[in-house]
Image (cartoon, coloured by chain):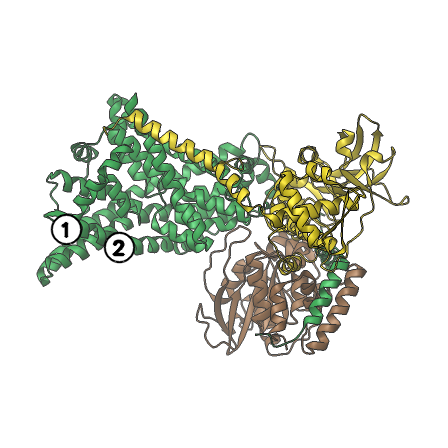
Amino acid sequence: MEYNPLWALSIFLILIGVLWWFFQPNKGWFWQLKKQSRINEKIIIEDILKQLYHFETSSQKVDMKTLIQVLNYSNHKLLEALNVMGIKHLISNDLNAIKLTESGREYALRIVRVHRLYEKYLAEKTGFHKTEWHEMADSMEHHLSHEEADLLADQLGHPQFDPHGDPIPTRSGQIAEILGTELHLLPIGTVGHITHIEDEPEVIYKQILAENIHIGSLIRVIESNPTRVVFESEGEIFKLAPVVAANLTITLLSAEGDTQQDIARLSSLQKSEKGKIIGFSKEIRGENRRRLLDLGFVKGAMVDLDLVNPLGDPNAYAIKGTSIALRKEQADKILIEKIES
Amino acid sequence: MDKKNINHIIQLSKELRWQIGDDFHDHLTEGIYADAAQIVNDSVRLKNGKTTNRLDQKIDAIVTSKIWGFPIMFILLGLTLWLTIIGANYPSALLGHLLLDTVHPILKQGSEVIGLPFWLDGFLIDGVYLAVAWVVAVMLPPMAIFFPLFTLLEDFGYLPRVAFNLDHLFKKAGAHGKQALTMSMGFGCNAAGVVATRIIDSPRERLIAIITNNFSLCNGRWPTQILIATIFIGAVVPPLFSSLTALLAVIGIAVLGMFFMFASSWLLSKTVLKGEVSTFNLELPPYRPPRFWKTIYTSLIDRTLIVLWRAVVFAAPAGAVIWLISNIEINNLSIAFHLIQFFDDFGFLIGLNGVILLAYIVAIPANEIVIPTVLMLTVLVTGIDAGVGQGVLFELDSASATGAILREGGWTLLTAVNLMLFSLLHNPCSTTIYTIYKETNSVKWTTIATLYPILLGLAVTFLVAQFWRIF
Amino acid sequence: MKTGMTTTCETCPHYTSEGLKKMGVDADQADFVIALAGNPNTGKSTVFNALTGLRQHTGNWPGKTVAKAEGAFSYRGQKYKLVDLPGTYSLLSTSEDEEIARDFILFGQPTITIIVVDANRLERNLNLVLQILEITQNAILCLNLMDEAERNEIEIDVRTLSKDLGIPVIPTSARYKRGIPELLQAISEMANGQTQVQPHKIKRVPPNIEKAVNRLSKEIKKEFPGVPNSRWLAFRLLEGDPQIIQALKTGVFS
């Protein structure tokens, strides 16, 4: 074939197009095929068990219909899996309600343990963004054995909670307690900490993340009605729709605890002001958290704004005699009390 | 080999840990700092109540100010590069004269006197010695100027302020502000730039800095860019503007390199590197007057000589290979000739030619010898008499003579443009590849760092060639 | 701050760098092994160079020395091997530098660990110092950059500091070779067992952690009666440090 630049160019573009089609993130054929090939009976069973467990803890009844709604499998495959589960005594099927048996609950708890441990692992030891944790853990939960989960727990220092604030069951089935109320149910004026942020459904979770709301933050409810919930946290005002607010769990502070009205984020510190560190958001995790602690950003340390960046970010803060630059998203998550100087 | 049975202790530690809860590390560090505060309170007294130095604050206010911060930075970097390029000319010419024009003939004569066989003399003196001499002459002077200057700025404490000023730009590309410095170091030598990434203590950002360092045009590539731009690009415009145009073309290539650096950093941080841990902290140390002679001495030992040594180690075998392929013949034609023919079609497709591709393959060890290799191979293919033996690296004194040979070899403006692009976008030299492996300890990242730029280079030169021919 | 820093004594023959012979990298068959630890950017490498006569590059950058460097010197007829550890802020995290430093202090069993600190930023430096004092008994605090501290008008009561920490404290300005003779003297005395030390132990830990640590530490002592740092091992076990677990199993500490 005679060389022609137009031809060469077209062949090149077609080649790129085909490759993109196959390998584009998430939607590419390659990934779709890979995902499909992984689904087998074990995974369906484990997904059903997990759903049953979640319904059970929120004391809802489950029948075939609800399962079909939440799980993205064909009726045929679901029925087949339920059949096998019955034979293996993982579920008991009485009067339209599907229930977990003792061994089924144990199995489900293991899946939940692996899922939450793995999310904790992703949060502490890797750099994946938090919007990706859930999906990755969803696929990992089917592949880790008891022993591997234990190793993971050792490595993570036997955590009690996952990064969303859900308790991680121990191997023997112990679960740390969370006491809390969903945000939209709280009366005006209530003060408490955010102890749990639900990561499902994804649409709402992403909305919460976009608002820059952090787990562990102290909040005070200002307004609460069927159209919106308004609260104040760390010196800023947040407005949420009640559906979104329902995905935040708040643990109340005891009445005598000081409400710390003058909490502010380090990022709001001005050149003329002085601050005293009163805490760190739980959102600073893993290596980042350890580094900042090592650098002296500990409770009670005095801090002031040392250098303002010509581009606005990062700014340098003087702490314990040294100037250390922090990016805004870090300074957002360090809480201070402003002090008159 | 487990000698002790301490399972009960381990078990106890696990239970206790679970009971303590997730804040163990926080509490422990807070406890240590509380003790530290008490001790300091007992024994330290501040006379003026401030620990920070007034002069430091004044300097900082200037070098990080909105008005002066950036100009100071660009002036210092420009000055450093200018001193390097201008200052290196003379010693480079001197070294070149000494090693290539004086020592080389003496060696040749010596070998004649003791009667070395033709092949041993060619292999050792024309192959190994010439390549090494070339690398030393081109590489040593600029590095011996650039690194001490850079180190002086570093010792003074200015460089962390540069990272501070620029971090916002780098953050947008998913990188660390300190990459500005490893990148600048790459303008001197990519291998040194890769070593310098040690100052970035966040794993993800460090890998980004390592993989993208190759987009900084290094010392070995500046001369290629300048020469080709002078011969071909400068010739496009009237003689009055030719040197200015050539200069702008070279700067354009360097800026293009920065663009690719930012774009690649962004791409890497969003794809293959997104799972790596990312942290940020940047300490701004107090200024300290650098101690001039000591700095010069240590930077020569630490950076210049180590990098030079590695380059020499890699260049020697390359010289041998170059000599061998142009002197061993199959069917009356040298291996080099066969290889050039083999690469010629593909070379044409990406707007280059077989000679250039072969030169880049044999010159992987050091970019410095690309131009001499290209000239030698062009002479070999076209059969022009340049007054040197087969397989002997050489360079011509005047750019126009070089241009004449290259045009004889079929070079066009497109070849020149694509060579400049390819010189920017191709695999790192083997010294750098080896250094990347040493620093990352990972075959995976070394492979990515090697293949990514060359694939990018092939794609870019291909596209440029097709569009060039269409329009 | 005038202790031994200046004046006439520097010229008299008794000002004893005289017994010092810098031996560069020749570190074979040393009588004692000395580790050099400290935060980044405290002039640790300068101290190293002042003692060994080597010229490691000491950039004004946090975190310059990554691998550990070795050198040697002899003093009053005894030979010392000096190991320059990577500068770290802490030994509790998991970065590579910290592991190298931690492993050497713990398993390399140096005779003495010299901790170089920046006198201007004592508080932040003490974070590392207090951690090292949990691991090892024989440590000397080298209070470096005293010249800068003087310029910044910072006064440090060396005796109180020494009493609080329970180890010798030597003020130095390694850049100008000040305080090095005193440091050598202190090294020599401690290496030959003439120094009494009682390292500070971390006190302000929350009660629930303290209780857990005590329980664990008691168990460790039962199994390994000889270990001096059972408390620190307990801290590490609570962190689930796999290397420490392995070391305990293979009986490194017994």
Please give the chain letter of the residue carrying mark 2. Answer: B
Please give the chain letter of the residue carrying mark 1. Answer: B
Task: Characterize the local packing of mark 2: few (<14), some (14-19) or many (20 or more) Cα atoms within 10 angstroms.
Answer: many
Residue B367 screen position, x and y as percent:
30, 45
Residue B380 screen position, x and y as percent:
14, 42
Q: Say whether disc 1 or disc 2 marks the residue closer to the N-terminus.
A: 2
Task: Characterize the local packing of mark 1: few (<14), some (14-19) or many (20 or more) Cα atoms within 10 angstroms.
Answer: many
Q: Colour of chain C?
A: brown
Which of these two is toward me, B200 or A5?
A5
Residue A85 screen position, x and y as percent:
68, 51
Instruction: Give me the residue at 13% from left, 50% from top.
Output: B330
Tag in front: 1 or 2: 1
Q: Which of the 4 image quarters holds residue C130? A: bottom right
Q: Colour of chain A?
A: yellow
Position of B289 with respect to B28 (left or right) is left
Which of these two is toward me, B437 or B316?
B437
Instruction: Give me the residue at 10% from left, 40% from top.
Output: B385
Secondary structure under tag 2 reads helix
Mark 1 vs mark 2, CA separation in Å: 17 Å
| Residue bearing mark 1 | B327
Residue B350 screen position, x and y as percent:
29, 33
- Are marks 1 and 2 in one subunit? yes
> In the rendered image of this protein, does residue B322 appear above or below residue C48?
above
Position of C246 with respect to B118 (left or right) is right
Which of these two is toward me, C77 or B158?
B158
Q: Amino acid at mark 2?
A: Ala
Q: Which of the 4 image quarters holds residue C135? A: bottom right
Q: Colour of chain B?
A: green
> In the rendered image of this protein, does residue A86 appear above or below residue A236?
below
